[in-house]
Amino acid sequence: MSIHNLKIRTRLTIAFGLMVALILIIGGTAALKSRVLLGEFGSVVNDHYPKVTEVYQIKAAVAANEVALANMLAYRMPDNIKAQVSSLQATRKQITALFKKLDESVTSGDGRAALERTKAPRAQVLALQDKYLEAMDMGLSGDAATLLEKEMPAPLKTYKESIDGLLKVQHELMGQATATATASVQGMLWIIALASLIAIALGVALAWSIIHSIIRPLHDAVAVANAVADGDLTRPIEASGNSETAHLLQALRRMQAGLIKVVSHVRQDSEGVATASAEIAQGNHDLSSRTESQASALEQIGRAHV
């Protein structure tokens, strides 16, 4: 069915419905993508970033323990040693709690592997720390110094490297999640921009089609009316469809046909009147001729009697 056969109200309703549908599609797409983005950014903020922060806290706590162990040997006053031991025990509990949280939250294969690599060197460092504390408690500062300066550096270095490896993995995972979220944002922007362009193009096409389907018949109607006003009843009128403008052109075509009939009847009547007038004039002429003939004959008779 052609759009020209539809009523103007129906055309406008269809156009409005299509625009509403496009707006709903754009809005629905944006809503769905927004939910995906919320999930992806939520993963960065609530999952990856806390893990990175926890590994940094472990790294800082390990460094604090190094300082505490060194301070015990450098400042051997009982009160200082007691304070450093308390600090060491507190940071060790903190580290244990942080590793427990990581063990519960890390699920990726690379993350689990990196976390596993920290366990053996950590256990070795903890064992050496316990021996160091035992030596300090017994007043064996020489043995403690040997542990701190010769036996502990290599395992501690391995332990720190494993923590750095865990931190690197978590950074990479957070970077991947951030890149995915950024790509989703860009994809959503492209989808919205493309859908908006399609909506604009379709809106322009619908507007042009509707305006053209309304204006052209109105122009034809105006041209027919002007032709009739100028006395031209021969202009052809094309009127098809069931729209209001088609009904207008059909009415003008019926009016034109009616005017042609009226003019034809008037012309026929005028021709009849002209014929009758000619016949009357001819009869008057014949009567005048006979009158003149009779007068001439009477005149001749009068002369003969004289």
Image (cartoon, rainbow, N blue to C red):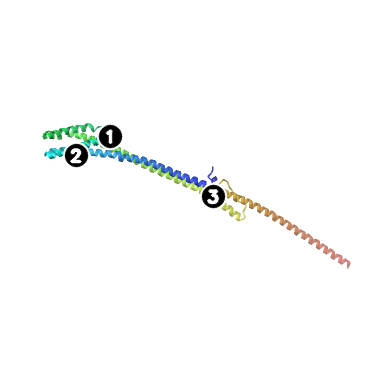
What amino acid type should be assigned to the residue bearing mark 3? Arg
SS under mark 3:
helix
Judge the density around disc 2: few (<14), some (14-19), many (≥20) Cα neighbours within 10 Å: some
Residue at image coords 51%, 46%? 11
In this view, 14 is above or below 121: below
Q: Amino acid at mark 1?
A: Glu
Which of pointers 1 and 3 lies earlier in the amino acid sequence?
1
Exactly how many numbered labels are in the figure? 3
* Of labels 1 and 3, the one closer to you: 1
x and y percentages locating residue 75 in the rendered image: 12, 40
Q: Are marks 3 and 2 in contact (CB under 8 Å)?
A: no
Question: Left or right: where does residue 43 sit relative to residue 222?
Answer: left
Instruction: Tell which residue pokes out farthest to the right in this image.
Output: 305
According to the picture, the residue beneath numbered tag 2 turns out to be: 64
According to the image, label 3 marks what residue?
A: 216
Mark 3 neighbour density, 10 Å: few (under 14) some (14–19) many (20 or more): few
Callout 2 amino acid: Ala
Q: Is residue 199 above or below residue 101?
A: below
Q: Is residue 42 visible?
A: yes
Residue 246: x, y in percent?
A: 57, 48
Which secondary structure lies at badge 1?
Answer: helix
Disc nearer the start of the sequence (3/2): 2
Q: Determine the CA span between mark 1 and mark 3.
A: 74 Å
Q: Can you tell which of label 3 and label 2 is closer to the viewer?
A: 2
- Left or right of 184? Residue 274 is right
Q: Is residue 204 above or below residue 54?
A: below
Residue at 26% in and 37% down: 168
The residue identified by callout 1 is: 104
x, y percentage for residue 136? Answer: 13, 35
In the current view of this chain or complex, which residue is farthest to the bottom?
A: 306
Give the alpha-carbon distance from disc 3 to disc 2, as whole Å: 86 Å
